[in-house]
Image (cartoon, rainbow, N blue to C red):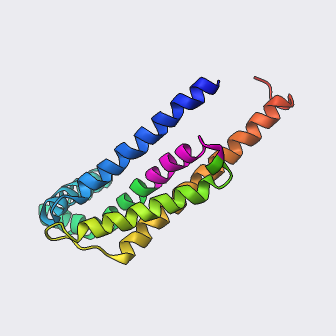
Amino acid sequence: MKGFRYKSRYVWFAAALFWMALIFFYSSQEAASSSKVSGSITYRMAEGIDGMFHLEWDAQTKRRIGEALEHPVRKAAHMTEYAVLAWLLLGNCMQYPLFFKKSYLWAGIGASCYAATDEFHQLFVKGRSGEIKDVMIDSAGACAGLLFAWLVLSVWNKFKKEKERGEING
């Protein structure tokens, strides 16, 4: 089992680095390019809403709905990407006895620090800006992700203990 734990350290570390590189890649896109991608996604969302509820919106209405959805969808995407980063950092921290007891804290700090460096990086990207409110949104996503991880792991550990005591069959 020790060999597995040793190897999983590399997997968690590599996954976190990969995710950070992905965030960096998307943050490196110029504002116009990034907005074009977001706009096409939210327009398709408006089309999906129209089709699902048979609203028969014209193209202009779909475009307006898509534009209205763009900002909240972008912020939700940021929160989600930092929730995933926090999960990966949490898994990484849990591999080391030194960090295990405070792994949630270290994962949250790591994700928040990366959010700050990402916003700083955006100061150098055409049409982008680095904003403290975005660091806060990203950090909130990381905290929400860590809370979700804590809930899932708590339920999982409770289930395992009940199973070990024979309270659950199977």
Residue 63 is drawn in which quadrant?
bottom left
* Rendered view: 93 above or below 135: above
Which quarter of the rendering shows the C terminus?
A: top right
Q: Nearer the viewer, residue 137 or 91?
A: 91
* Left or right: 154, with 104 as reference point: right
* Left or right: 68, with 132 as reference point: left
**Rendering coords of residue 123 (x, y %):** 23, 71
Q: Residue at x 45, y 50 (%)?
A: 84
Q: Nearer the viewer, residue 122 or 43?
A: 122
Q: Main secondary structure of the magenta part?
A: helix
Q: Residue at x 26, y 65 (%)?
A: 121
Magenta stretch, residue numbers: 83-97
* Left or right: 145, with 167 as reference point: left
Q: Residue at x 38, y 76 (%)?
A: 133
* Rendered view: 133 above or below 8: below
Question: Can residue 18 be seen from the camera position used here?
Answer: yes
Q: Residue at x 36, y 50 (%)?
A: 20
Residue 94 is drawn in which quadrant?
top right
Which quarter of the rendering shows the N terminus?
A: top right
**Rendering coords of residue 59 (x, y %):** 13, 61
